[in-house]
Amino acid sequence: MSARSIFTRPARLAAIAPYVWMVLFFLVPFGFVLKISLSQTAIAQPPYLPVFDLTQGIAALRSAFAAMSLDNFRLLVSDDLYVLSYLRSLVVAAVSTSILLVIGYPIAYGMARLPQRWQPIAMMLVIIPFWTSFLIRIYAWINILQHDGLLNKILLALHIVSAPVVWLSTDSAMYLGIVYSYLPFMILPLYATLAKMEPSLLEAASDLGASPRRAFWLVTFPLSLPGVAAGILLCFIPIVGEFVIPDLLAGSNSLMIGQTLWLEFFTNKDWPVASAAAVMLLVLLVVPLIFYDRLQRRQLGDSR
Amino acid sequence: MTARGLNRLSTFNAVSLALGVAFLYLPIVILVIYSFNASRLVTVWGGWSLRWYSEFFHDRAMLDAASMSFRVAATSATIATLLGTLAAVALSRGARFKGRTLFSGMLYAPLVMPEVITGLSLLLLFVAVNAERGFWTVTIAHTSLTMCFVAVVVQSRLGVLDRSLEEAAMDLGCDPLRAFIAVTLPLILPAIAAGWMLAFTLSLDDLVIASFTTGPGSATLPIRIYSEVRLGVKPEINAICTLVIGLIAAVIVIASLASKLSSARGESAAPL
């Protein structure tokens, strides 16, 4: 009997505890989101109707089902506020992911071309900000971008502008914040594929007469596409639902869906509508999530 | 032309690297410098001072939030490391089992799932079972998120591990559990440690999930910082942020030293 098959049974037993945990605290909660997205708003604690009460037996269950409605979803697709915030989320995520790719690729490429012994240090430098608080890094930008912040001071001192420019509460500030926060997520998968690339391939291309530029577009870039895909997914999916960055850096005249959800939940205390918004957000993300799951499986040698 | 020549760093490569690193670090450096500013006005430099640090150490509410955050981070990171390691072992050594696809899907999805969804769904669960919201609900929520990161870190380490070592141990008469404890565990220990630290810092960072799952009177540090930041820049916040950055930097240094130590013993360093 091979070692692998001897190891199999205890390894399967190891799955039990994390499995149960994830079902209880990841899967089941989605059931609640779905259920509450179908119920009605109420001024009560908790603020939704009907409340499942299992002690009341089957009859209560049946009446609970009867009271379910798609009203919240109808509201979401008919109210401009929600439709616009969905569209805005998609546009912001697409635009920022493109910027991230354009900025992240040269950096990852530079890292992969560093001498071997410098590469771990460069990787460390990219990872450290990823470990540092999200909130703190956004706050750092507020310091710089505010009305009498460093950026305006420098611009004024250099006579590039004659009066302080409004940076905070603009879309540019938000894009800057998103690009800043997600850059490591883009660089790391790109670097991982670029670093693995066989240098002899480029040598062959140049032997066959390709200019370095041509060799890059014909050899390097196509081979790095798995990294590109991973970087895009790692950035796009969470950015669609981003809350903190647009909330602190963008203006309040147009919201992303994460902000709308937050607002409905914390300010309007409309849990059913917030849940419906979450369901819609999830629907929006199902396709990229499936792609991401496949990629992750392949990467971790998990496709057995 | 040799491959070496082709592989040399061009000016373009060097410039993009330098700009990238500057972009990533400059804002943090500025934040740290301004935390030592004596002036009340965050934008005017008034000389070096530690007054905002002492302000923080006299701010009862902030200190309570910090202590809450640390307790949550330490507890959730520990549970997450345990569960995440088990999950990684199951996925990389367990071959096929029922519900495997669902299992790995549930483990990978939270890595990219927008936090508003995770937070909201967990809150609805806690409300439905009438759990009292506070320390434990936030801890459970953070554990669910961070165990996935631990699982990925440990799993990628297990993936590059030489299986013949485990096989040899079992040929020599170890049962699987003993082989795992005697051979596999010491080899993946650096990855497990890195996983714990990653889980700790992620929990310490999290604003969105904690906001949904905590109850009145038990705010975490990010929740407090966030409510202050919304009102504008305050020097005290710079000081707190600097302390958090310092702490995380220390954690990273320890982590990289630990992985250096293990690679000095002839093992390759753990990823992340």
Image (spheres, rainbow, N blue to C red):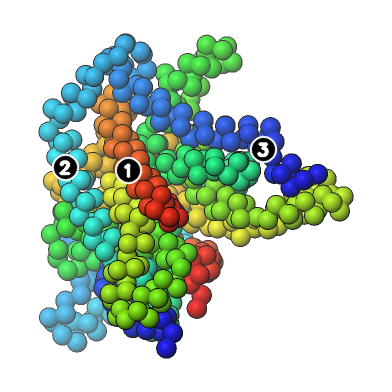
Q: Is residue B10 visible?
A: yes
Tell me whether the residue at label 3 lies in contact with that at label 1, contact meaning CB atoms closer than 8 angstroms. no
Compared to residue B242, the image places residue B79 above or below, namely: below
The span from disc 3 to disc 2 (Cα, nearest Å) is 47 Å
What distance separates the C-alpha of mark 3 from that of mark 1?
A: 31 Å
- Report the residue marked by disc 1: B254
Mark 3 and mark 1 lie on one chain; the one further toward the N terminus is 3
Do the residues at discs 3 and 1 belong to one chain?
yes
Residue placed under numbered mark 2 in the picture:
B67
* Relative to A36, residue B242 above or below: above
Which chain is disc 2 placed on?
Answer: B
Q: Amino acid at mark 3?
A: Leu
Q: Amino acid at mark 1?
A: Ile
Q: Residues within 10 Å of mark 1 (few under 14, many from 20)?
A: some
Cα gap from disc 1 to disc 2, whole angstroms: 22 Å
Neighbourhood count class around disc 2 (C-alpha, 10 Å): few under 14, some 14–19, many 20 upward: some
Say whether mark 2 and mark 1 are on the same chain: yes
Farthest front residue in view: B172
At x 31% / y 47%, what residue is drawn? B201
Q: Secondary structure at mark 3?
A: loop
Three-letter code, disc 2? Ser
Q: Is residue B49 above or below residue A300?
A: above
Q: Nearer the viewer, mark 3 or mark 2?
A: 3
Relative image position of residue A285 (x, y in whole percent): 48, 63
Judging by the rendered image, the residue that carries numbered circle 3 is B9
x then y, percent, for residue B173 = 32, 81
**Which residue is at a point 26% across and 55% down the rendered structure image?**
B77
SS of the residue at dot 1? helix
Q: Nearer the viewer, residue A101 or B231?
A: A101
Where residue A249 appears, as percent x and y from the top left, is 43, 36
Name which of mark 1 and mark 2 comes first in the sequence: 2
* Front position among marks 1 and 2: 1
